[in-house]
């Protein structure tokens, strides 16, 4: 009922004059309070725009890195973003394909649980997302996978504070860090997709050996040490043997963080995402492993 009609109704009630005045006063007082609360709420709870600073306040990105939040339709990279990132790849000393981190994509939170990435150099954002393309806080590096290859990148938070790689369904991710002052915030992230061997345990060994050799044989990476390894869980009889191998592997890389994932758990099969974000206020990278369906989240580093 409109407020004016409510007042007329109160005044027409068959009650004494003093009671009608009291009821009218209470009604008006309540209306003023409600109005005041509505005004204060509109001031203290503004609508969050897609790409405004600080980027950490963006709902979509909060949920992306948040514990237990699923990833709807995964992180959707445009074909151009994948293609242009791929074309920067060069074979590096020691092996593997190194991607050039000077070219970036930009992120857009299309909904609270959906993030998409487009190529910053040429792909224009849809209306309302123009600031995503121009603000460095929403830029991201991307490493695509290649069959039976190691692809990697040396991250630079001055270029982009976000990192993504192709979804994991058996591949591995390695992170190497350096104590050198100029390289402390520039970790190497490697996506290992060596799957020539039929047995998963052999693939596990092959990936570990090749990555260690890559870091050792390239003089530019001598300051780097492996800090984390994300791997797919071997099943059946190989599981116990894989555990023994990883215990030995850990002894060669003391302090390394070993994180496993299983794409075929008892419940629902799912793929995983390896995500990274550099928080400027902390001057530190955070890497997580996240299930796309249930949002299961492991801190990797």
Image (tube, grey):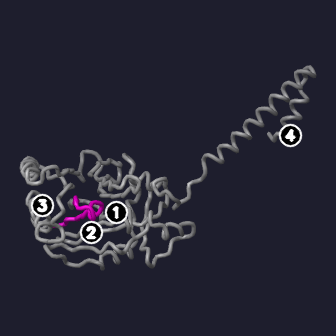
Packing grade of label 3 (10 A; few <14, some 14-19, many >=20) is some
Kind of element beneath mark 3: helix
**Relative depth, front residue between 177 and 25:** 177
The CA span between labels 1 and 2 is: 10 Å
The CA span between labels 3 and 4 is: 76 Å
Total count of labels: 4
Q: Which residue is mark 1?
A: 163
Q: Looking at the image, which residue is at 14% across and 51% down?
A: 235
Kind of element beneath mark 4: helix
Q: Which residue is mark 4?
A: 4
Q: Quadrant of residue 21?
A: top right
The CA span between labels 4 and 1 is: 57 Å
**Relative depth, front residue between 196 and 275:** 275
Disc nearer the start of the sequence (3/4): 4
Disc nearer the start of the sequence (3/2): 2
> In front of the other: label 4 or label 1?
1
The CA span between labels 4 and 2 is: 67 Å
Using the image, tell me which numbered label, if any, was put on residue 204. none
Q: Is residue 168 left or right of residue 31?
A: left
Q: Looking at the image, which residue is at 91% across and 29% down?
A: 12
Disc nearer the start of the sequence (1/2): 2
Kind of element beneath mark 1: strand
- Residue projecting furthest to the right: 17
Q: Is residue 84 left or right of residue 110?
A: left
Q: Which residues are magenta?
A: 177-194
Q: Which residue is mark 2?
A: 153
**Relative depth, front residue between 112 and 222:** 222
Q: Which residue is mark 3?
A: 208
Residue 257 seen: yes
Q: Looking at the image, which residue is at 83% across and 35% down?
A: 6
């Amino acid at each position: 009922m409109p407020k004016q009609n409510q007042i007329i109704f109160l005044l027409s009630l068959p009650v004494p004059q003093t009671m009608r005045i009291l009821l009218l006063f209470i009604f008006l007082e309540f209306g003023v309070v409600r109005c005041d609360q509505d005004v204060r709420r509109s001031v203290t709870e503004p609508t969050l725009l897609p790409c405004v600073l600080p980027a950490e306040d963006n709902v979509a990105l909060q949920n992306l890195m948040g514990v237990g939040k699923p990833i709807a339709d995964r992180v959707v990279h445009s074909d151009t973003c994948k293609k242009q990132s791929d074309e920067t790849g060069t074979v590096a000393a020691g092996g593997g394909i190194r991607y050039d981190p000077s070219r970036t994509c930009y992120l857009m939170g299309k909904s609270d649980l959906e993030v998409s990435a487009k190529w910053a150099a040429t792909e224009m954002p849809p209306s309302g997302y123009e600031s995503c393309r121009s603000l460095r806080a929403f830029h991201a590096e991307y490493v695509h996978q290649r069959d039976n290859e190691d692809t990697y990148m040396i991250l630079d938070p001055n270029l982009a504070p976000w990192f993504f790689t192709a979804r994991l369904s058996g591949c591995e991710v390695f992170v190497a860090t350096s104590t050198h002052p100029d390289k402390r915030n520039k970790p190497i992230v490697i996506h290992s997709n060596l799957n020539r061997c039929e047995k998963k345990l052999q693939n596990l060994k092959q990936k570990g050996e090749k990555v260690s050799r890559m870091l050792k044989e390239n003089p530019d990476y001598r300051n780097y040490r492996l800090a984390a390894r994300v791997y797919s869980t071997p099943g059946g009889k190989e599981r116990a043997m894989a555990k023994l191998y990883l215990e030995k592997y850990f002894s060669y890389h003391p302090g390394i963080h070993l994180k496993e994932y299983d794409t075929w758990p008892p419940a629902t099969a799912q793929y995983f995402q390896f995500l990274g974000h550099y928080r400027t206020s902390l001057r530190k990278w955070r890497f997580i492993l996240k299930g796309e369906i249930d949002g299961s989240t492991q801190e990797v580093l």
